[in-house]
Image (cartoon, rainbow, N blue to C red):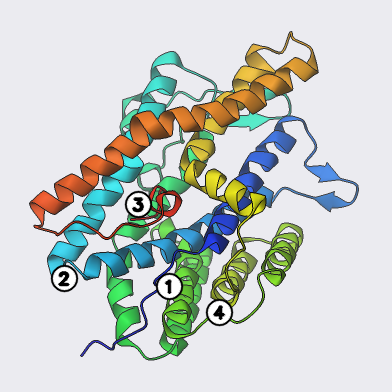
Amino acid sequence: MQLTTKRPTQDSHNLDFLRAMAVSLVVVFHLLLFFGKVTIGHVNLRWMGLVGVLLFFVHTSLVLMFSLDREQTKLGGAKLYGSFVLRRCFRIYPLSILAVTVIYLLQLPMSHLAAGHMFYIPTGGLGFLSNILLVQNLTNKESILGPLWSLPYEMQMYLFLPFLFLFANRIRSIRPLLGLWVAAVVVAMLQARIGHMPDVVKYVPCFIPGIIAYKIWSTSQPRWPFRYWPLALAAIVAAAILFVDYERGWIICLLTGLLVPRFMDMPKGWVQKSCQMIAKYSYGIYLGHYLCLWAAFVKFAFLPMAAQWVIFLATVVALPVLVFHTIEEPMIRVGKHLAQRVFNARPAPSVRTSLAAMPDAG
């Protein structure tokens, strides 16, 4: 029998802060990598981008738990699962397919970057199809767009998140989820040492903490003042950048999942609004910043450096806004409409636009 839990009734601006931090780490790392500044003094920042992606994974699973929570009020069983997967596909694939197609046809150098250089790696027909379907990790093909490497893991985890959501709602405490996290870590360590398992398993311990956070949020009230949340997250990020590898990264994700539901919500103000806007357009920022970097610092490298930075900053703001309103938002609506028609769902209750518009929101 399913247990009754206290459903979250208010979207958290703290999650906007977490997502803004994640995408900022990725963008800043790629800028540092391009300019050859990954090592600053005795500090090596080579893990900064990975830390950002791991925070994305925690955020993704947590926000999708909220999305499933809302969907459960309208659907159940196979309909809940089908609606969830259909909407995820319409949220993620349209922009990624456009990016992959443009890069492939124009052979834009977006596959890898190094100090002062960006590269295009020919993938062939199978590689192109793998990137279109977001299964590069299964076919052992290069990502035609560097940041695209993480999306296959998200898409594959989407297949399991509804089951984990149902499990989380049937237990009384986070202890079984902590046990599940430990088991996932063991499996991931085995995969790293002996192989013979899909490589997605090494990221499962990064998604489970989001489910742990959802369970905490569903059964208790945040009690810690918000002002300590940026400090806690900064400490986690600093420790992660200095010491992270995949195994320590799992612990970083667990700490983030355990802490994020403990803090009261961010007060209104310019910081809250800025994080909300970055979170809203974060998917376009994540997929588009390579293009902005290439346009500013490679294509227009003959311009003064100040002009190059103006181009980068202008495009990294304008491009995500453009693709959100012309591609992402319309496809979100199409996905919701199809899900309602195919699975006979009642219209979802309204939620705050920035959260609902994220790649991993409902």
Q: Work out whether mark 2 precedes mark 3 in sequence or the reverse, and give the earlier one.
A: 2
Residue under numbered circle 2: 76
| Number of marks present in the image shown | 4
For the N terminus, the quadrant is: bottom left
Query: What amino acid type is highlighted by mark number 2?
Result: Gly
Judge depth for marks 4 and 2 and give the one in front: 4
Of residues 38 and 192, which is closer to you in this image? Answer: 38
Task: Please tell me whether mark 4 sits on a helix, a strand or a loop.
Answer: loop
Task: Please tell me whether mark 1 sits on a helix, a strand or a loop.
Answer: helix
Image location of residue 102, percent across then percent down: 40, 21
Query: What amino acid type is highlighted by mark number 1?
Result: Ile
Judge depth for marks 3 and 1 and give the one in front: 1
Residue under numbered circle 4: 222
Pointer 3: residues within 10 angstroms few (<14), some, or many (20+)? some
Instruction: Identify the residue at image location x=76%, y=30%.
Output: 35
Instruction: Identify the residue at image location x=52%, y=55%.
Output: 56
Quadrant of the image occupied by residue 82: bottom left
